[in-house]
Amino acid sequence: GVRKEFIVSAKQWSFTPAVIKVKKGDTVVLKLKSTDVTHGMFIPDFNINETMEPGVMKTIEFLADKSGTFTYSCNIPCGAGHKAMSGKLIIE
C-alpha cells in the first residue's frame, strides 16, 4: 500500500471531504481540524475516537487493513444537526 493523506475539516454539521477513498493496505493519514466548535472523529471499525478542537490540527494515522464502506461520525454533541454529521470511508 501507499501513504494517503487527507485534510478533514469539520463544521456544523458536516465533514469535508464527506467521502474518503483508499485501497486496502494503504496507510491513511487524517489531518483533522474544526472550523467552528468542538467536534469528534469516530470510526469504530478502526478504533478511532478523537476530539477536534477549533483551530488545532490533529493528525491520526492507521492502516486500512479491511475492505468495505465504513461510516465516520461526530461523537461530540455539536448542535441541532449533530446526528446527521457523518461521512464515508471506502476501502477498496
Image: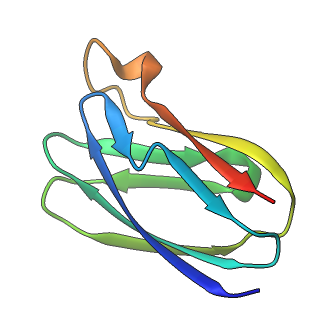
The number of numbered badges drawn on the structure is 0
Q: Which residue is drawn at 68% across and 56% down?
A: 47
Residue 71 occupies which quadrant of the picture?
top right
Q: Horizontal and vertical percent for residue 80?
A: 27, 11
Residue 46's quadrant in the figure? bottom right
Give the residue at x 69% y 46%.
44
Q: Which colour scheme is used?
A: rainbow
Instruction: State the image coordinates of residue 63 (x, y, percent, origin top left).
Output: 73, 75
Q: Which residue is drawn at 56% across and 79% down?
A: 4
Question: In this orientation, which residue lies closer to the viewer: 16 or 62?
Answer: 16
Residue at (24%, 30%) from the top-left corner?
12
Question: In this image, 65 relative to 9: left or right?
Answer: right
State the quadrant of the C terminus. bottom right
Image side of residue 92 versus residue 6, left or right = right
Among all residues in the image, which is located at the extreme right? 66
Residue furthest out toward the top: 80
Residue placed most toward the observer, 38 or 67: 67
Q: In this view, does 89 lie above or below 86?
A: below
Nearer the observer, 86 or 55: 86
Give coordinates of residue 26: x percent, y percent. 72, 79
Q: Which residue lies furthest to the bottom in this view?
A: 2
Left or right: 72 in relation to 30: right
| Position in image of residue 82 (x %, y %) | 37, 21
Considering the image in quadrants, where does the N terminus appear? bottom right
* Looking at the image, residue 21 lies above or below residue 73: below
